[in-house]
Amino acid sequence: MSIRAWWKGIWPPFGAVVLLLVMWQLATCFFQIEDWILPSPARIAQEAEKSYTSLLGHTWATLKLTLSGFGIGAATGLIVAGVLHYIPFLRRALYPLLILSQNIPLIALGPLLIIWFGFGLLSKLIVIVLVCFFPITVAALGGLAGTDRVMMNYMQMIGATRGQIFWKLELPYSLPAVFSGLKIAATYSIMGAIIAEWISSSEGLGYYMLLQQSAFRTDRMFVAIMIVIAFSLIMFSLIVLLEKWCVRWQNDSTSNSKGGIDRA
């Protein structure tokens, strides 16, 4: 992608963010809003610079927790999807339970996890895994079920085994759907880490936000929120790049199809 094309795609959201910040700054100055109610963007930037050293440790703790939970959640979601796809009876039996599991509020489940697994790392990882695995499982199941039936029948006719059909046809076809689930789970994993740190932690951005809330330091709360947003965008972008690399065959086939249509 050329710089011109990249800028053409990025400037509308970039301009909207800049406009929002300018309006925010003007509104806080014009209405003389107190910092503890709604700090201005300039005030938040100043506080971010002053709190840099204390935030670094909390940020690193949240990052480690998020990446660990996301990795385990992604692996769990893919394994569950593969098993449920391979055994249709289990899918019919367990799929409603998977949906029900997402209706349990994590804030209510958190204290139970602490009772069962203690205040350590395990209870926090379980919270993130519960948040991450569901979108990946649902997306992967949809992708596996959407395999091209013509190609499926052809491979069955030539005597391909169940394993060959899965690895050479169903899995490649499901990758776009799987990456859609991974992108959702990547953003959810940050939220799961923050909730887990609210429930039980002595470090991390969630713990930092609780401390600042009790002290009415709204500016520091916004600094932590900005870091969480930056994490979400970075993780989402990394998944998009990985998707482009893993499913480049789809982009190539799309380009070829367009080329064929243009030539026609």
Image (tube, rainbow, N blue to C red):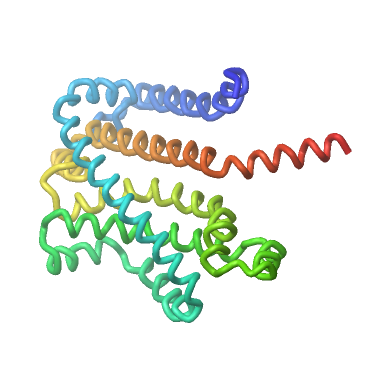
Asked whether 3 or 223 is in front, the reply is 3
User: Residue 102 in the image: x percent, y percent?
Assistant: 38, 66
13 vs 189: above or below: above
34 vs 243: above or below: above
Asked whether 239 or 160 is in front, the reply is 160
Residue displayed at 22% across by 35% down: 59
User: Residue 134 in the image: x percent, y percent?
Assistant: 41, 62
Left-right relation of 264 to 199:
right
Residue displayed at 59% across by 55% down: 173
Residue displayed at 37% across by 68% down: 103
For the C terminus, the image quarter is: top right
Left-right relation of 87 to 47:
right
User: Residue 238 in the image: x percent, y percent?
Assistant: 43, 37
For the N terminus, the image quarter is: top right
User: Residue 51 in the image: x percent, y percent?
Assistant: 18, 26
151 vs 227: above or below: below
